[in-house]
Image (cartoon, grey):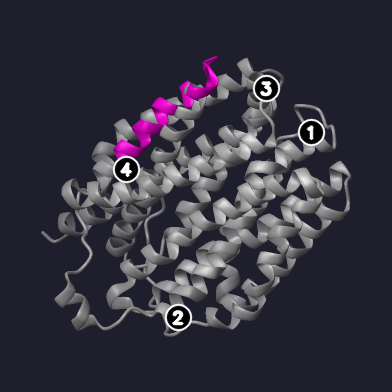
Amino acid sequence: MSAPTTIRPVAGIRRSRVAVSASYAAQGFGYAVVVTSLPNLKTRHGIDDIVVSLIVLLVCLAAAGGSLLADRLAVRWGSRVALVVGLLLEAVALPLIASPVGLPAFIAAFAIYGAGLGIVDAAGAMQGVLVQQRAGVSVMAGFFAWYTGAAIAGALLMSAVAGTAANAGIALVAGAVVALAIAIVGVRGFDPRRTKLPSAPDAARHGKLPHRGITVFGTVVLAAFVVDSAVSTWSTVYLHDVLLTGAAIAPLGYAAYQAAILVTRIGADRLVRRFGRVVLAVCTTVLAILGCLVVATMPVTWAAVAGFALAGFGVGALVPLAFSAAGELHEARSDEVIARVNLFNYAGAVLGAVLVGLLADSTGLAQAFLVPMVMLIPVLFLARRFAPRQPRAAAPVPAP
Protein backbone atom coordinates (compact mmCIF):
# COMPACT_ATOMS: atom_id res chain seq x y z
CA MET A 1 0.00 0.00 0.00
CA SER A 2 2.98 2.32 0.39
CA ALA A 3 4.00 2.21 -3.29
CA PRO A 4 1.52 4.87 -4.53
CA THR A 5 2.61 7.20 -1.71
CA THR A 6 6.22 6.87 -2.85
CA ILE A 7 5.61 7.13 -6.58
CA ARG A 8 3.33 10.15 -6.44
CA PRO A 9 5.83 12.56 -4.82
CA VAL A 10 8.57 11.42 -7.20
CA ALA A 11 6.28 12.01 -10.17
CA GLY A 12 5.37 15.43 -8.76
CA ILE A 13 9.02 16.39 -8.42
CA ARG A 14 9.72 15.25 -11.95
CA ARG A 15 6.77 17.22 -13.34
CA SER A 16 7.77 20.38 -11.49
CA ARG A 17 11.40 19.96 -12.50
CA VAL A 18 10.44 19.63 -16.16
CA ALA A 19 8.21 22.71 -15.95
CA VAL A 20 10.83 24.86 -14.23
CA SER A 21 13.50 23.63 -16.66
CA ALA A 22 11.21 24.68 -19.51
CA SER A 23 10.81 28.16 -17.99
CA TYR A 24 14.60 28.53 -17.82
CA ALA A 25 14.79 27.38 -21.44
CA ALA A 26 12.20 29.95 -22.51
CA GLN A 27 14.15 32.66 -20.70
CA GLY A 28 17.45 31.67 -22.32
CA PHE A 29 15.98 31.37 -25.81
CA GLY A 30 14.19 34.70 -25.64
CA TYR A 31 17.19 36.58 -24.27
CA ALA A 32 19.49 35.09 -26.90
CA VAL A 33 17.34 36.17 -29.84
CA VAL A 34 17.02 39.67 -28.37
CA VAL A 35 20.74 40.32 -27.90
CA THR A 36 21.78 38.73 -31.19
CA SER A 37 19.19 40.78 -33.10
CA LEU A 38 20.68 44.09 -31.92
CA PRO A 39 22.72 44.78 -35.09
CA ASN A 40 19.65 44.46 -37.31
CA LEU A 41 17.52 46.47 -34.88
CA LYS A 42 20.19 49.19 -34.77
CA THR A 43 20.04 49.47 -38.55
CA ARG A 44 16.25 49.54 -38.69
CA HIS A 45 15.91 52.37 -36.15
CA GLY A 46 19.10 54.23 -37.07
CA ILE A 47 20.51 54.21 -33.53
CA ASP A 48 24.10 54.06 -32.32
CA ASP A 49 25.90 52.21 -29.52
CA ILE A 50 25.08 54.94 -26.98
CA VAL A 51 21.35 54.49 -27.55
CA VAL A 52 21.76 50.71 -27.34
CA SER A 53 23.55 51.17 -24.00
CA LEU A 54 20.71 53.31 -22.69
CA ILE A 55 18.14 50.75 -23.82
CA VAL A 56 20.09 48.01 -22.05
CA LEU A 57 20.17 50.18 -18.92
CA LEU A 58 16.40 50.59 -19.20
CA VAL A 59 15.99 46.82 -19.45
CA CYS A 60 18.14 46.32 -16.34
CA LEU A 61 16.17 48.89 -14.36
CA ALA A 62 12.87 47.38 -15.52
CA ALA A 63 14.18 43.92 -14.60
CA ALA A 64 15.03 45.13 -11.09
CA GLY A 65 11.48 46.46 -10.79
CA GLY A 66 10.15 43.19 -12.16
CA SER A 67 12.11 41.28 -9.54
CA LEU A 68 10.51 43.36 -6.78
CA LEU A 69 7.08 42.82 -8.36
CA ALA A 70 7.73 39.07 -8.42
CA ASP A 71 8.19 39.14 -4.64
CA ARG A 72 4.82 40.81 -4.17
CA LEU A 73 3.06 38.45 -6.56
CA ALA A 74 4.67 35.43 -4.89
CA VAL A 75 3.62 36.51 -1.40
CA ARG A 76 0.03 37.08 -2.49
CA TRP A 77 -0.54 34.27 -5.00
CA GLY A 78 2.62 32.15 -5.06
CA SER A 79 5.69 32.11 -7.30
CA ARG A 80 3.80 29.96 -9.84
CA VAL A 81 1.55 32.92 -10.65
CA ALA A 82 4.52 35.29 -10.71
CA LEU A 83 6.40 33.07 -13.16
CA VAL A 84 3.39 32.80 -15.49
CA VAL A 85 2.90 36.60 -15.41
CA GLY A 86 6.57 37.15 -16.28
CA LEU A 87 6.46 34.72 -19.19
CA LEU A 88 3.29 36.37 -20.53
CA LEU A 89 4.93 39.81 -20.40
CA GLU A 90 7.86 38.48 -22.40
CA ALA A 91 5.45 36.89 -24.89
CA VAL A 92 3.83 40.31 -25.41
CA ALA A 93 7.08 42.29 -25.59
CA LEU A 94 9.08 40.20 -28.06
CA PRO A 95 6.71 40.67 -31.04
CA LEU A 96 6.53 44.40 -30.25
CA ILE A 97 10.34 44.60 -30.38
CA ALA A 98 10.23 42.85 -33.76
CA SER A 99 7.51 45.11 -35.17
CA PRO A 100 8.34 48.12 -37.41
CA VAL A 101 7.14 50.62 -34.82
CA GLY A 102 8.50 54.06 -33.97
CA LEU A 103 11.41 54.52 -31.60
CA PRO A 104 9.27 55.43 -28.53
CA ALA A 105 7.17 52.26 -28.92
CA PHE A 106 10.34 50.28 -29.56
CA ILE A 107 11.84 51.51 -26.29
CA ALA A 108 8.56 50.85 -24.43
CA ALA A 109 8.59 47.27 -25.72
CA PHE A 110 12.06 46.81 -24.21
CA ALA A 111 10.77 48.17 -20.89
CA ILE A 112 7.97 45.58 -20.91
CA TYR A 113 10.46 42.88 -21.81
CA GLY A 114 12.76 43.98 -18.99
CA ALA A 115 9.92 43.76 -16.46
CA GLY A 116 9.07 40.26 -17.65
CA LEU A 117 12.74 39.31 -17.59
CA GLY A 118 13.07 40.36 -13.94
CA ILE A 119 9.90 38.58 -12.88
CA VAL A 120 10.98 35.34 -14.57
CA ASP A 121 14.48 35.61 -13.08
CA ALA A 122 13.14 35.95 -9.55
CA ALA A 123 10.13 33.65 -9.77
CA GLY A 124 12.13 30.99 -11.63
CA ALA A 125 14.65 30.98 -8.79
CA MET A 126 11.81 30.71 -6.25
CA GLN A 127 10.39 27.74 -8.14
CA GLY A 128 13.85 26.20 -8.41
CA VAL A 129 14.29 26.44 -4.64
CA LEU A 130 10.91 24.76 -4.07
CA VAL A 131 11.85 21.88 -6.39
CA GLN A 132 15.25 21.63 -4.74
CA GLN A 133 13.65 21.41 -1.29
CA ARG A 134 11.37 18.61 -2.42
CA ALA A 135 14.20 16.76 -4.16
CA GLY A 136 16.51 17.00 -1.17
CA VAL A 137 19.57 17.82 -3.29
CA SER A 138 20.77 20.75 -5.37
CA VAL A 139 19.31 20.83 -8.88
CA MET A 140 19.93 24.47 -9.75
CA ALA A 141 22.84 23.74 -12.09
CA GLY A 142 20.51 21.64 -14.22
CA PHE A 143 18.13 24.57 -14.60
CA PHE A 144 21.00 26.81 -15.66
CA ALA A 145 22.03 24.18 -18.20
CA TRP A 146 18.56 24.29 -19.78
CA TYR A 147 18.83 28.08 -19.95
CA THR A 148 22.20 27.83 -21.67
CA GLY A 149 21.18 25.13 -24.12
CA ALA A 150 18.15 27.15 -25.19
CA ALA A 151 20.29 30.28 -25.53
CA ILE A 152 22.57 28.41 -27.92
CA ALA A 153 19.53 27.35 -29.93
CA GLY A 154 18.37 30.97 -30.07
CA ALA A 155 21.76 32.21 -31.28
CA LEU A 156 21.95 29.50 -33.94
CA LEU A 157 18.43 30.34 -35.08
CA MET A 158 19.53 33.97 -35.49
CA SER A 159 22.49 32.77 -37.54
CA ALA A 160 20.15 30.77 -39.78
CA VAL A 161 17.70 33.62 -40.41
CA ALA A 162 20.26 36.45 -40.36
CA GLY A 163 20.25 39.21 -42.93
CA THR A 164 17.42 41.66 -42.29
CA ALA A 165 15.37 43.03 -39.43
CA ALA A 166 12.37 41.16 -40.83
CA ASN A 167 14.20 37.84 -40.48
CA ALA A 168 15.31 38.80 -36.97
CA GLY A 169 11.66 39.41 -36.22
CA ILE A 170 10.91 35.78 -37.05
CA ALA A 171 13.23 34.65 -34.26
CA LEU A 172 11.78 37.18 -31.81
CA VAL A 173 8.25 35.95 -32.54
CA ALA A 174 9.48 32.38 -32.06
CA GLY A 175 10.75 33.40 -28.63
CA ALA A 176 7.33 34.83 -27.82
CA VAL A 177 5.63 31.59 -28.86
CA VAL A 178 7.96 29.56 -26.64
CA ALA A 179 7.35 31.83 -23.63
CA LEU A 180 3.58 31.72 -24.17
CA ALA A 181 3.57 27.91 -24.49
CA ILE A 182 5.58 27.46 -21.29
CA ALA A 183 3.31 29.89 -19.43
CA ILE A 184 0.22 27.88 -20.44
CA VAL A 185 1.71 24.47 -19.72
CA GLY A 186 3.45 25.63 -16.55
CA VAL A 187 0.21 26.57 -14.82
CA ARG A 188 -0.14 22.90 -13.91
CA GLY A 189 3.53 21.99 -13.71
CA PHE A 190 4.91 24.77 -11.51
CA ASP A 191 4.89 24.22 -7.77
CA PRO A 192 1.78 25.92 -6.25
CA ARG A 193 3.27 26.42 -2.78
CA ARG A 194 4.05 29.87 -1.45
CA THR A 195 7.18 31.01 0.33
CA LYS A 196 7.57 34.08 2.52
CA LEU A 197 10.49 35.78 4.16
CA PRO A 198 10.43 35.21 7.94
CA SER A 199 8.92 37.82 10.22
CA ALA A 200 11.24 39.94 12.33
CA PRO A 201 10.89 37.70 15.44
CA ASP A 202 11.57 34.57 13.36
CA ALA A 203 14.57 36.17 11.72
CA ALA A 204 15.95 37.19 15.09
CA ARG A 205 15.64 33.64 16.39
CA HIS A 206 17.60 32.30 13.41
CA GLY A 207 20.46 34.79 13.91
CA LYS A 208 21.91 37.61 11.85
CA LEU A 209 22.46 37.31 8.13
CA PRO A 210 26.10 36.65 7.13
CA HIS A 211 26.58 40.00 5.42
CA ARG A 212 30.30 39.49 4.82
CA GLY A 213 29.68 36.17 3.07
CA ILE A 214 26.84 37.71 1.07
CA THR A 215 29.22 40.45 -0.08
CA VAL A 216 31.91 37.90 -1.00
CA PHE A 217 29.68 35.73 -3.15
CA GLY A 218 27.74 38.74 -4.40
CA THR A 219 31.05 40.11 -5.70
CA VAL A 220 31.66 36.82 -7.52
CA VAL A 221 28.18 36.91 -9.03
CA LEU A 222 28.66 40.56 -10.02
CA ALA A 223 31.94 39.76 -11.79
CA ALA A 224 30.38 36.80 -13.60
CA PHE A 225 27.44 38.87 -14.78
CA VAL A 226 29.70 41.71 -15.92
CA VAL A 227 31.30 39.17 -18.24
CA ASP A 228 27.97 37.64 -19.19
CA SER A 229 26.29 40.94 -19.96
CA ALA A 230 29.29 42.30 -21.87
CA VAL A 231 29.54 39.21 -24.08
CA SER A 232 25.78 38.75 -24.47
CA THR A 233 25.18 42.37 -25.45
CA TRP A 234 28.29 43.23 -27.42
CA SER A 235 29.83 40.06 -28.89
CA THR A 236 27.56 40.07 -31.95
CA VAL A 237 27.94 43.83 -32.38
CA TYR A 238 31.74 43.54 -32.07
CA LEU A 239 32.03 40.78 -34.67
CA HIS A 240 29.58 42.46 -37.06
CA ASP A 241 30.47 46.16 -36.75
CA VAL A 242 34.16 46.12 -35.75
CA LEU A 243 35.56 42.94 -37.32
CA LEU A 244 33.12 43.25 -40.26
CA THR A 245 32.06 39.61 -40.27
CA GLY A 246 29.02 38.46 -42.22
CA ALA A 247 25.56 38.48 -40.66
CA ALA A 248 25.62 34.68 -40.43
CA ILE A 249 28.97 34.64 -38.60
CA ALA A 250 28.40 37.44 -36.09
CA PRO A 251 26.06 35.50 -33.75
CA LEU A 252 28.57 32.62 -33.50
CA GLY A 253 30.66 34.44 -30.89
CA TYR A 254 27.68 34.38 -28.55
CA ALA A 255 26.93 30.78 -29.53
CA ALA A 256 30.52 29.73 -28.71
CA TYR A 257 30.28 31.55 -25.39
CA GLN A 258 27.05 29.77 -24.48
CA ALA A 259 28.43 26.41 -25.65
CA ALA A 260 31.35 26.78 -23.24
CA ILE A 261 28.94 27.64 -20.43
CA LEU A 262 26.82 24.59 -21.24
CA VAL A 263 29.80 22.21 -21.29
CA THR A 264 31.01 23.63 -17.99
CA ARG A 265 27.64 23.29 -16.29
CA ILE A 266 27.11 19.76 -17.52
CA GLY A 267 30.46 18.65 -16.12
CA ALA A 268 30.76 20.96 -13.11
CA ASP A 269 29.28 18.56 -10.55
CA ARG A 270 31.74 15.81 -11.45
CA LEU A 271 34.66 18.22 -11.43
CA VAL A 272 33.67 19.51 -8.00
CA ARG A 273 33.51 15.97 -6.63
CA ARG A 274 36.98 15.26 -7.98
CA PHE A 275 38.86 18.52 -7.45
CA GLY A 276 36.69 20.65 -5.17
CA ARG A 277 34.98 24.01 -5.67
CA VAL A 278 38.09 26.09 -4.98
CA VAL A 279 40.16 24.49 -7.74
CA LEU A 280 37.32 24.71 -10.25
CA ALA A 281 36.67 28.37 -9.40
CA VAL A 282 40.34 29.31 -9.82
CA CYS A 283 40.87 27.41 -13.07
CA THR A 284 37.73 28.67 -14.78
CA THR A 285 38.35 32.25 -13.63
CA VAL A 286 41.85 32.15 -15.14
CA LEU A 287 40.37 30.90 -18.42
CA ALA A 288 37.79 33.69 -18.43
CA ILE A 289 40.44 36.35 -17.76
CA LEU A 290 42.51 34.96 -20.62
CA GLY A 291 39.46 34.97 -22.91
CA CYS A 292 38.66 38.63 -22.26
CA LEU A 293 42.32 39.51 -22.84
CA VAL A 294 42.31 37.69 -26.18
CA VAL A 295 39.20 39.58 -27.33
CA ALA A 296 40.71 42.91 -26.30
CA THR A 297 44.13 42.40 -27.90
CA MET A 298 43.57 40.15 -30.95
CA PRO A 299 41.12 41.75 -33.43
CA VAL A 300 40.73 38.60 -35.53
CA THR A 301 37.44 36.76 -35.98
CA TRP A 302 38.64 33.31 -34.91
CA ALA A 303 40.49 34.75 -31.90
CA ALA A 304 37.42 36.72 -30.80
CA VAL A 305 35.17 33.66 -31.03
CA ALA A 306 37.75 31.62 -29.07
CA GLY A 307 38.04 34.39 -26.48
CA PHE A 308 34.29 34.52 -25.97
CA ALA A 309 34.31 30.74 -25.50
CA LEU A 310 37.04 30.96 -22.84
CA ALA A 311 35.01 33.62 -21.02
CA GLY A 312 32.09 31.19 -21.00
CA PHE A 313 34.04 28.63 -18.98
CA GLY A 314 34.37 31.13 -16.14
CA VAL A 315 30.74 32.25 -16.14
CA GLY A 316 29.48 28.69 -16.50
CA ALA A 317 31.21 27.63 -13.29
CA LEU A 318 31.20 30.76 -11.13
CA VAL A 319 27.45 31.39 -11.06
CA PRO A 320 26.34 27.95 -9.78
CA LEU A 321 29.43 27.69 -7.52
CA ALA A 322 28.66 31.04 -5.92
CA PHE A 323 25.02 30.19 -5.25
CA SER A 324 25.94 26.75 -3.90
CA ALA A 325 28.51 28.19 -1.51
CA ALA A 326 26.24 31.06 -0.48
CA GLY A 327 23.48 28.60 0.37
CA GLU A 328 25.76 27.08 3.02
CA LEU A 329 26.43 30.39 4.77
CA HIS A 330 23.27 30.19 6.91
CA GLU A 331 21.04 27.23 6.13
CA ALA A 332 18.17 28.44 8.33
CA ARG A 333 17.95 31.62 6.25
CA SER A 334 19.36 30.39 2.95
CA ASP A 335 16.47 31.83 0.91
CA GLU A 336 17.23 35.32 2.19
CA VAL A 337 20.94 34.84 1.55
CA ILE A 338 20.36 33.67 -2.02
CA ALA A 339 17.90 36.51 -2.67
CA ARG A 340 20.48 39.09 -1.59
CA VAL A 341 23.32 37.50 -3.53
CA ASN A 342 21.07 37.42 -6.60
CA LEU A 343 20.67 41.22 -6.52
CA PHE A 344 24.32 41.58 -7.55
CA ASN A 345 23.56 40.15 -10.98
CA TYR A 346 21.64 43.31 -11.96
CA ALA A 347 24.58 45.53 -11.01
CA GLY A 348 26.79 43.22 -13.07
CA ALA A 349 24.39 43.43 -16.01
CA VAL A 350 24.49 47.24 -15.93
CA LEU A 351 28.27 47.42 -15.63
CA GLY A 352 28.88 44.80 -18.29
CA ALA A 353 26.47 46.06 -20.91
CA VAL A 354 26.33 49.79 -20.29
CA LEU A 355 29.92 50.55 -19.24
CA VAL A 356 31.39 48.50 -22.08
CA GLY A 357 29.12 50.27 -24.55
CA LEU A 358 29.98 53.72 -23.22
CA LEU A 359 33.70 52.98 -23.30
CA ALA A 360 33.43 51.70 -26.86
CA ASP A 361 33.11 55.24 -28.22
CA SER A 362 36.29 56.44 -26.51
CA THR A 363 38.59 53.40 -26.36
CA GLY A 364 37.07 51.13 -29.00
CA LEU A 365 34.83 48.15 -28.42
CA ALA A 366 37.73 45.67 -28.34
CA GLN A 367 39.56 47.48 -25.54
CA ALA A 368 36.30 47.87 -23.63
CA PHE A 369 36.39 44.09 -23.00
CA LEU A 370 39.23 44.77 -20.56
CA VAL A 371 36.50 45.88 -18.10
CA PRO A 372 35.14 42.35 -17.49
CA MET A 373 38.71 41.06 -17.31
CA VAL A 374 39.56 43.48 -14.50
CA MET A 375 36.33 42.60 -12.65
CA LEU A 376 37.33 38.92 -12.62
CA ILE A 377 40.71 39.42 -10.95
CA PRO A 378 39.33 39.80 -7.36
CA VAL A 379 37.60 36.43 -7.73
CA LEU A 380 41.02 34.75 -7.63
CA PHE A 381 41.58 36.18 -4.16
CA LEU A 382 38.11 35.18 -2.97
CA ALA A 383 38.26 31.63 -4.31
CA ARG A 384 39.21 30.07 -0.97
CA ARG A 385 35.76 31.02 0.33
CA PHE A 386 34.27 28.42 -2.02
CA ALA A 387 35.53 25.62 0.24
CA PRO A 388 32.55 23.59 1.52
CA ARG A 389 31.49 24.30 5.08
CA GLN A 390 29.91 20.94 5.68
CA PRO A 391 29.39 17.65 3.79
CA ARG A 392 26.26 17.17 1.76
CA ALA A 393 24.25 13.99 1.73
CA ALA A 394 23.72 12.51 -1.71
CA ALA A 395 20.17 11.69 -2.82
CA PRO A 396 18.74 10.34 -6.07
CA VAL A 397 16.91 12.90 -8.17
CA PRO A 398 14.63 12.05 -11.09
CA ALA A 399 15.93 13.44 -14.38
CA PRO A 400 13.74 15.96 -16.19
Q: Determine whether the residue tagged by mark 3 lies in a helix, strand or loop.
A: loop
Q: Which residue is mark 4?
A: 83
Q: Position of residue 360 (x, y in %)?
A: 75, 45
Q: Determine whether the residue tagged by mark 4 lies in a helix, strand or loop.
A: helix
3D distance between C-alphas at marks 3 and 1: 14 Å
Q: Residues within 10 Å of mark 1 (few under 14, many from 20)?
A: some
Q: Which residue is mark 2?
A: 212
Is 95 included in the stretch rendered in magenta?
yes
Question: Could you tell me which residue is drawn at 74 percent across and 57 percent down?
Answer: 310
3D distance between C-alphas at marks 2 and 3: 46 Å
**Relative to residue 339, is residue 365 drawn left or right?**
right
**Relative to residue 250, is residue 19 drawn left or right?**
left
Question: Could you tell me which residue is drawn at 37 percent across and 32 percent down?
Answer: 89
Q: Which residue is mark 1?
A: 241
Is 90 included in the stretch rendered in magenta?
yes
**Relative to residue 333, is residue 118 drawn left or right?**
right
Q: Determine whether the residue tagged by mark 2 lies in a helix, strand or loop.
A: helix
Q: Which residue is mark 3?
A: 46
Residue segment shown in magenta: 83-104
Which quadrant, please, contains the N terminus?
bottom left
**Relative to residue 80, is residue 229 drawn left or right?**
right
